[in-house]
Image: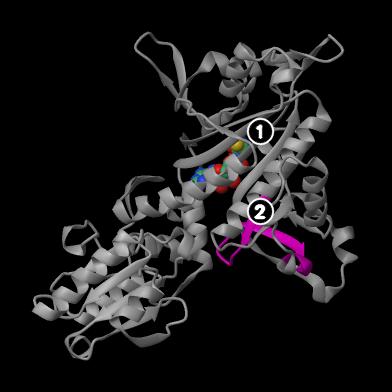
Amino acid sequence: MRLSRYFLPILKENPREAEIVSHRLMLRAGMIRQQGAGSFSWLPLGKKVLDKVCRIIREEQDRAGALEILMPTIQSADLWRESGRYEDYGKEMLRIKDRHERDMLFGPTNEEMVTEIFRSYIKSYKDLPLNLYHIQWKFRDEVRPRFGVMRSREFLMKDAYSFDLDFEGAKAAYNRMFVSYLRTFTRMGLKAIPMRADTGPIGGDLSHEFIILADTGESEVFCHRDYLDLKVPGEATDFTNDDEIAGIVRDWTTPYAATDEMHDEAAWDKIAEGDRLSARGIEVGHIFHFGDKYSKPMGAKVTGPDGKDHNVSMGSYGIGPTRLIAAIIEASHDENGIIWPESVAPFDVGIINMKAGDAECDRVCDELYSKLTAAGRDVLYDDTDQRPGGKFATADLIGLPWQMIVGPRGVAAGEIEIKNRRTGERETLPIEAATKRLGAA
Ligand code: 5CA
C-alpha cells in the first residue's frame, strides 16, 4: 500500500476524551472513529489489525475442532422467552420492535439461537461432539461504556458453543477451548492467565476468564507467580487426545489464580508472599460450562447409546477481538506509539522514502516495494512528501515492526537502513541484504 493512496487520519494532539493509552493511541493512529457512546467505526488501519486478530482466532478454533457459522445480530425475543433469559437479562439488552410490533433484540450473546439450530438438526449422540462458533457483532447497553473499544456497547465477539452427550464430554470440549485460548493469546504476543471467575448472566458453575495483566485493567486479580513461566502448548498439540488436553488444563489450573469475585483469602494466605501476584487485569476471553441450562428448557436432546433421551451438556466460549486489540496495545507500546507483535501488525514492513521525488530514492523504493510485496509481505510505502521526521513519527506511532529507511546518501552508496520498532536497533545494509533480511530474495 502506498501511503499517498491510503486513508490514515493521524492525530497530532492527544485526544482529550481518551483516558487510557490504548484508546489514545488507537485514535491517534487513525484506527478507529467514535460514532456514539461505546460505538466505533474501524478505519483501514484498525480493520487490518482486526482481520489479523480474527484470523488467528479462527485458525485456533478450527485446530481445536470448532466449526465456523454466522448467526444474525437481531434475534427474536420468543427464543429468549424459552430459556427464561428475556426477563432476566435486564437493561443491558437492547430491545427493539419490528414493524409488526414483534419483540426483537440485538444479540448480546447467542446461546439460545445456537441451541435452536442444534435441536432442529441433531437427534443422536453419534453426531456429537459438536462445537459451532461465529465472529459477530454484539450489543450490550453497558452502564458505563469507556476506554474506547475496551468496554464498548457494540463490539465484536467470537463465541463458540459446544454440545456433548454428558458432563464428561462437555468437560473435554471445555478443555479443548481452554487450550485453544492459551495458544490464541500467545500467538498475539500476550501472556493470558486463566482464572476462576464468576459466571454472571451466562450461568453455570464452572468458568475461567483469560486475563492479561495490565495496570489499566478493570478487574482486580490474584495469582501465583508460577504462571509467568508456564509453557504454552505448541502447534503439534493433539486436540483429539482428551487426556493430553486435560493434562495441559491441569497444569494451567493448579497454581492459584482467581478474579476478585472468586478470590479465596485462605488459599491466598497459604502462598509464600514472594510468589503472590496481585495486579489488575483485562479480561480478553471467558469460557463457561453450564450443562443443561439452555438445552433443558429449550428441548435440545439426543438419543444416547442407551436408547434414551438426554439433554445435551453445553458450554460457551467467548473472546472479544475488538477488546483484544486494546489489550495488545496496553501490553505493548512506548512513548512513541504502538509496538505491534508481528503476527497482528497492520503491515509487516514500512518503506520510508526520505526524499520522495528524487529519481534514485523513488527507484529503490519502488523496487523494494515490489520485491517485498511479491514475497507476500504486507508493505506500507511512505511515498508522501512529508518531512523525514514526520514520516518516522508516523511509522513508530502506527507501530510498523520493521522500517526500511531509504535516503539519497545511502542509495548513492547502495545501502539502506533497517530499523526494528521494538528494540529501536538500526542497521545499515546493502540494499539486497536488507531486502533478504525482511523476507524477499
Ligand atoms: N456467551 C458467552 C461466551 S461466548 C459470553 O458472552 N461471554 S462474555 O460475556 O464473557 O463475553 C465474552 C468476551 O467478550 C469477553 O471476554 C470480552 O473479551 C468481550 N466483551 C464482553 N463485553 C464487552 C464489551 N462491553 N466491550 C468489548 N468487549 C467485550
In front of the other: label 2 or label 1?
2
Q: Which residues are magenta?
A: 209-227
- Of the numbered discs in the image, which one, if any, rests on residue 187? none
At numbered mark 1, what does the secondary structure look like: helix, strand or loop? helix
Give percent across and percent down for residue 434: 35, 79
* Quadrant of the image containing the C terminus: bottom left
Q: Is residue 340 magenta-colored? A: no
- Of the numbered discs in the image, which one, if any, rests on residue 202? 1
Q: Is residue 425 shown above or below 264?
A: below
Q: Quadrant of residue 355?
A: bottom left
Residue, x 44% and y 52% (percent of image)? 52
Between 431 and 387, the one nearer to me in the picture: 431
Q: Amino acid at mark 2?
A: Leu
* Quadrant of the image containing the N terminus: bottom left
| Lateral position of residue 59 relative to residue 165, left or right | left
Q: Is mark 1 within 8 Å of ligand 1?
A: yes
Residue, x 31% and y 72% (percent of image)? 395
Q: Amino acid at mark 1?
A: Ile
Give percent across and percent down for residue 185: 59, 55
